[in-house]
Amino acid sequence: MTFKKTYFILFLILFLIEASIAYFLKTGFIRHTFGDFLVVILLYCLLKSFLNAKPITMAIIVLVISFIIEFLQLTPFLEWFNLHDNTFAKIILGSTFHISDLVAYTLGVITIIIAESKLKQTNF
């Protein structure tokens, strides 16, 4: 396991963007769709900061985690863990299932794979 500063800096930047979206925007495309697109990239950058795995492997892991969390929203999982009144948990884990979120996650992961392949081609 090696720490990759570049991925961690990207994670921090994306975290600030996501926090700003959550704080300032309560509705709309950017809050509900673009935020979901960015969150998979954020999670990817966080994991790549600490884990040495192939980009495609890490991207698939991130997609699976995202899908699991989204499908958990079909259940009362927040209530199971007594988090149904926790605003932070609702923002991070979500509380309502939307197929459009699955599309946003998938597009985010496709973006990751394309970006990583372009970086590899340029030997960055």
Image (spheres, rainbow, N blue to C red):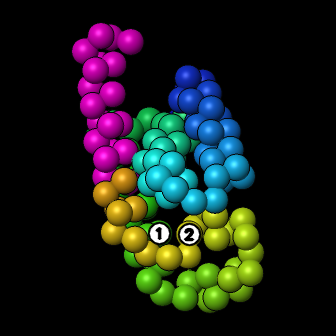
* Apparent side of residue 7 relative to residue 17 in the rendered image (left or right): left
Q: Main secondary structure of the magenta part?
A: helix
Percent coordinates x, y for residue 13 in the rendering: 62, 32
Which residue is rendered at x = 52% and y = 56% of the image?
28
The correct choice, above or below, for 80 with respect to 10 in the image is: below
Q: Residue at x 72, y 65 (%)?
A: 88
Answer left or right for 82 relative to 8: right
Mark 1 = which residue?
69
Magenta span: 105-124
Which numbered disc covers residue 94? 2
Marks 2,1: beta carbons within 8 A: yes
Does 39 appear in magenta?
Answer: no
Q: Could you tell me residue 32's position as x and y percent?
A: 50, 58
In the image, residue 123 sits, relative to residue 102, either above or below, namely above
> Can you say whether 61 is above or below 92 in the image?
above
Residue 39 seen from this side: no
Image quarter where the C terminus lies is: top left
